[in-house]
């Protein structure tokens, strides 16, 4: 991993067209400004990981649970 | 095409029902081809079934059934990648996580599955704004949940 030290208002350039600026430093919190061509997806890492685990959880549904779901939906529609 | 799925057995469908996710979906990046299964007994849940991994099928739903005002802001770039300029071609699903108590099922409004019906391309798009929950309750929170009523009331 490349490690760089930056001070307030200093920047990093990636690939000549992505510019990251340190906008504010407040204790353990840093505000970054990111300028990048719009085809680049920029996301908070934890959001990406949360969606990933949500997808895994979604795919994890067991056949037993599907049977339960079917019986629930069936009993509800037949109650009507 | 005929596939043998782990959850629903042998399924046959037309080749024009194959949806290509060029970037896969998060957590399953290597799987690019899916189809939407409509299993009558599990409606209103549909299934995003991977064609190249028989065990992988994600329940998903029409988010407008529970949040009629749902308005995901989709990047122009995403529309470009899907090959459309017009969002009327788009079909939106959200994935559902079903825990052991199915009444606690949640759907991920923060990362909708967006499909261009005109060319069968799909993406899972993670919304930039934090307006929508990754764990939105699917069913109304009340005692003696009546599942069918939940969807009826949302109409």
Image (cartoon, rainbow, N blue to C red):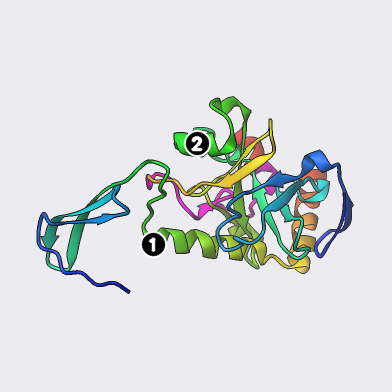
At mark 1, the secondary structure is helix
| Left or right: residue A28 compared with residue B61 | left
**How far apart are the alpha carbons under marks 1 and 2?**
24 Å
**C-beta proximity under 8 Å, tags 1 and 2:** no
User: Per the image, is B141 magenta?
Assistant: yes
| Left or right: residue A33 compared with residue A52 | left
The residue shown at (81%, 48%) is: B39
Against A2, is A23 above or below? above
Q: Using the image as rendered, state which of residue B94 and residue B146 is in the foreground.
A: B94
Q: Tell me the crowding category of disc 2: few under 14, some 14 to 19, or many 20 or more residues within 10 angstroms, Cα based.
A: few
Against A48, is B118 above or below? above
Same chain for labels 1 and 2? Say yes or no. Answer: no
| Left or right: residue B28 compared with residue A69 | left
At mark 2, the secondary structure is loop
Residue at numbered disc 2: B70
Against B54, is B70 above or below? above
Residue at numbered disc 1: A45
The residue shown at (49%, 33%) is: B69
Q: Position of residue A8 (x, y in %)?
A: 9, 58
The residue shown at (69%, 38%) is: B120
Against B90, is A20 above or below? below
Q: Position of residue B78 (x, y in %)?
A: 50, 39
Residue A73 visible in the snapshot: yes
Discs 1/2, front: 1
Q: Position of residue A24 (x, y in %)?
A: 13, 56
């Amino acid at each position: 991993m490349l490690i760089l030290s930056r001070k307030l208002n200093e920047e990093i350039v990636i690939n000549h067209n992505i510019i990251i600026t340190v906008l504010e430093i407040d204790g353990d919190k840093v505000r970054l400004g990111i300028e990048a061509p719009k085809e680049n997806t920029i996301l908070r890492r934890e959001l990406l990981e949360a969606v990933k685990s949500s997808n895994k959880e979604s795919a994890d549904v067991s056949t037993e649970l599907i049977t339960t779901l079917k019986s629930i939906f069936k009993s509800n529609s037949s109650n009507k | 095409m005929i596939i043998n799925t782990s959850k629903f057995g042998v399924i046959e469908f037309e080749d024009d029902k194959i949806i290509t996710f060029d970037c896969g979906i998060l957590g399953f990046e290597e799987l690019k081809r899916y189809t939407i299964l409509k299993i009558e007994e599990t409606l209103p849940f549909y299934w995003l079934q991977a064609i190249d991994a028989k065990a992988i099928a994600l329940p998903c739903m029409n988010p407008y059934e529970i949040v009629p005002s749902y308005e995901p802001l989709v990047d122009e770039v995403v529309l470009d990648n899907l090959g459309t300029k017009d969002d009327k071609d788009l079909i939106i699903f959200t994935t559902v996580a079903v825990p052991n108590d199915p009444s606690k099922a949640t759907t991920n409004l923060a990362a909708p599955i967006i499909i261009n019906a005109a060319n069968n391309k799909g993406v899972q798009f993670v919304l930039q704004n934090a307006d929508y929950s990754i764990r939105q309750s699917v069913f109304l929170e009340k005692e003696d949940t009546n599942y069918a009523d939940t969807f009826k009331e949302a109409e």
